[in-house]
Structures are given as structure tokens and as C-alpha cells.
Amino acid sequence: MQTTFLIQSTGAGLYEFTRDVAGWLSGHGDGLLTLMVQHTSASLLVQENADPDVQRDLQAFFARIVPPSDDPAMSYLRHTMEGPDDMPAHIKAAMMPVSLNIPVEAGVMRLGTWQGIYLFEHRRAPHR
């Protein structure tokens, strides 16, 4: 069985959608859930969902190691026609997973207590 989750971003950041997936899985049996993002400048993560500082720190870390293309450190980039955040977003997506596999038992994801599923949008503009 398959479905599509539409996640509306308001720009770069982490967007938790654990509840959407859990609701869809409810009532199903055992198996392996596979999630894949169909967006070339975003990633999927299983990450802590208790302290919002974790999400802020992750964003700050990736912004630091992959700054926008108008930063002098990124002057070697050629793909810049779509804005200074586009190629860095592709680089970040290449560094992080774009698919996840999560065990499911009796229709419940076997995530840890503080784990959630996130879309990590790397572009500044809103996307769906």
C-alpha cells in the first residue's frame, strides 16, 4: 500500500510529520515503512522531537558547513541561476538521507521515545 504525504514548508527548516504517518499506519500490521522525499533540495531525518534546540542547532550546523552560494567560500559553485540557496540545498540533500526505513509492529512505528520523523527543507522559499 502506498500514500503521499504533502508537507507545506514556509522555508528552510525541519518539519515534523510523525503524527501524519502514525495516523496513516494505524490499524495496519507488521512490516517495514519506507519513506522517500520527492524533492531534490530536502532530506528526511529521524531526530529528537522533545527539545526544539536540537532542530535549531542542526539548521545552524548545516548553514555553517554549507553556506549560500553568495558566500565567498562557495565561489566555486556554477549552479547559481536559481538563487544562492539552491545549490547549497542540493549539497545538503546529498549529505543527508532522502529515504528512511522504519520498522512497524501492529501498525505502530518502532521509534524511540524522543524520536520523530522530519522533512528537512533546505531552500528558503516555501515548497510543497
Image (spheres, helix red, strand yellow):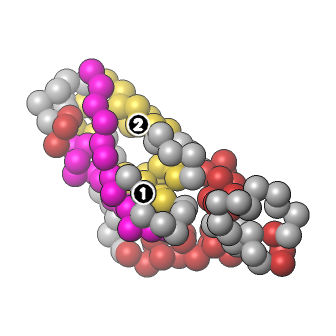
Between 52 and 36, the one lying in front of the other is 36
Q: Amino acid at mark 1?
A: His
Magenta segment includes 16: yes
- Find residue 93 and report its horizontal and vertical position in percent: 61, 51
Check disc 2 and report its element: helix, strand or loop: strand
Q: Is residue 111 left or right of residue 61?
A: left
Between 15 and 74, the one lying in front of the other is 74
- Residue drawn at 11 percent across, 30 percent down: 27
Check disc 1 and report its element: helix, strand or loop: loop
User: Which quadrant holds the N terminus?
Assistant: top left
- Find residue 63 and report its horizontal and vertical position in percent: 63, 72
From this viewpoint, is residue 115 visible?
no
Q: What segment carries the magenta color?
A: 1-22
Report which residue position mark 1 lands on.
Answer: 127
Q: How many marks?
A: 2
Name the residue at the left extreme.
Answer: 27
Q: Amino acid at mark 2?
A: Leu
Mark 2 and mark 1 in contact? Answer it, CB < 8 Å.
Answer: no
Q: Nearer the viewer, mark 2 or mark 1?
A: 1
- Residue drawn at 52 percent across, 51 percent down: 43
Q: Is residue 11 left or right of residue 62?
A: left
Report which residue position mark 2 lands on.
Answer: 35
